[in-house]
Amino acid sequence: MSTTVLLSIHALCSSDDALLARELRVASIRSQCAVVRTLLDEVDRLSPSSMTQEAMSAQLADELARLGRCILEAAAARSHGQRAV
């Protein structure tokens, strides 16, 4: 699975490190969403009696937890940044 990160020209040309950090966090969340979406598609495709569905479901739970952590970290960073302004 490709995890290409595309940042805006504005962020890449800016001297604002906070802007670049925000865009990297959002890119991380988008990448994790793609992983979760792929796993959900695979779980849907597998038959209910398949043993691989159990393993896939466990991986899905791990990936959803990772996605949740990414979202919480981004929200905390955004909240911290708003208080500093």
Image (spheres, rainbow, N blue to C red):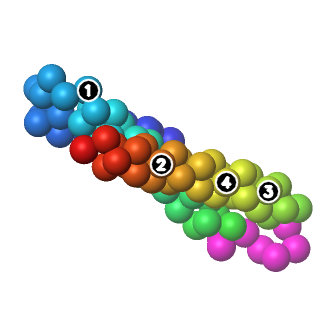
What crowding class fits label 4: few (fewer than 14 Cα within 10 Å), some (14-19), or many (20 or more)?
few
> What separation in Å lies between label 2 and label 4 (alpha carbons)?
16 Å
Which residue is rendered at x = 77% and y = 74% of the image? 47
Farthest residue to the bottom: give it: 48
Instruction: Specify start and end residues of the magenta stretch as a single range.
Output: 44-50
Q: Which residue is mark 2?
A: 76
> What separation in Å lies between label 1 and label 3 (alpha carbons)?
37 Å
What crowding class fits label 3: few (fewer than 14 Cα within 10 Å), some (14-19), or many (20 or more)?
few
The nearer-to-camera label among 2 and 4 is: 2
Q: Which residue is mark 3?
A: 58
In the image, residue 72 sits, relative to residue 49, either above or below, namely above
Which residue is rendered at x = 79% and y = 56% of the image? 58
> What separation in Å lies between label 4 and label 1 (alpha carbons)?
27 Å
Q: Is residue 33 left or right of residue 44?
A: left
Q: Pointers 1 and 3 in contact (CB under 8 A)?
A: no
Q: Which residue is mark 1?
A: 17
Mark 3 or mark 2, earlier in chain = 3
Location of residue 75 in the rendering, given as x and y in whole percent from the top left corner: 45, 53
> What separation in Å lies between label 4 and label 3 (alpha carbons)?
11 Å
The nearer-to-camera label among 3 and 2 is: 2
Mark 4 or mark 1, earlier in chain = 1
Residue at disc 4, secondary structure? helix
Q: Is residue 21 left or right of residue 65?
A: left
Location of residue 42 in the rendering, given as x and y in whole percent from the top left corner: 64, 63
Kind of residue indicated by mark 3: Ala
In the image, residue 71 sits, relative to residue 48, either above or below, namely above
Of the numbered discs in the image, which one, if any, rests on residue 65?
4
Mark 1 or mark 3, earlier in chain = 1
The nearer-to-camera label among 4 and 3 is: 4
Which residue is rendered at x = 17% and y = 39% of the image? 8
